Image: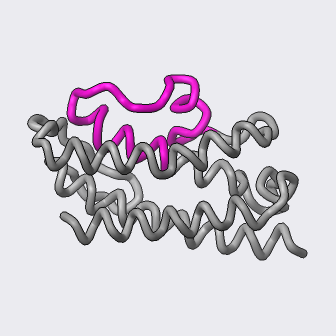
Amino acid sequence: MNFTFDVINNIREIFKKILEDNTLEELNRVPKGFNNNIIWNIGHIVVSEQLLAYKLSGLPANVSNELIDKYKKGSKPQEAVTKEGIEEIKALLFSTIRKTNEDYNAGVFKNYNAYTVSTTGNTLTNIDEALEFIMIHEGIHYGYILALLKAVKI
């Protein structure tokens, strides 16, 4: 599972750079033809990892319920994210996955409630499958963010 955590960390480094290299306005802009923005996608991957790894394992998430509600599947940006909000998400990119890696290595994830993901139709039945899907999910959102970056720079 080290490879999976390495890939997730690497893509999160890319997300961090995107947060640092774009203006607050660019991160918050919802371009015509899109239903969300760059910061929503990055917040979404943080929240999704917590839901897929922790909540489906019957464990508490390491992010607030407010953050979950703001970025969970089916949500949309409701208001502009502040500079402080961006910094919070940037910090959570690494603190959450570091904690998941530590908990994984400590054997914390003992149970798992099977969940069928809408993206691919696959059913996750354990933490290993969840982590593999999290890696794919973050890649999907990276592609979406690349499209958003082109759209906000026009």
Q: Which secondary structure type mostly characterizes the magenta part of the structure?
A: helix
- Residue at 69%, 57% in the rendered image: 38
State which quadrant residue 20 falls in.
bottom right
Q: Position of residue 142 (x, y in %)?
A: 55, 68
> Can you see residue 7?
yes
Q: How is the structure coloured here?
A: one colour
Q: Which of 83 and 25 is in front in this view?
A: 83
Q: Is residue 79 above or below residue 92?
A: above
> Can you see residue 125?
no
Q: Residue 84 magenta-drawn?
A: no
Q: In this view, does 66 lie above or below 22?
A: above
Q: Position of residue 15 (x, y in %)?
A: 59, 63
Q: Nearer the viewer, residue 40 or 98?
A: 98
Q: Is residue 106 above or below residue 150?
A: above
Q: Nearer the viewer, residue 3 or 44?
A: 3
The quadrant the N terminus occupies is bottom left
- Residue at 57%, 73% in the rendered image: 143
State which quadrant residue 69 falls in.
top right
Whether residue 118 sits left or right of residue 144 in the image: it is left
Q: Position of residue 28 (x, y in %)?
A: 79, 50
Whether residue 136 sits left or right of residue 103 in the image: it is right
Whether residue 138 sits left or right of residue 90 in the image: it is left
- Residue at 27%, 56% in the rendered image: 131
Q: Position of residue 11 (x, y in %)?
A: 48, 68
Magenta residues span 46-75
Q: Residue 56 magenta-drawn?
A: yes
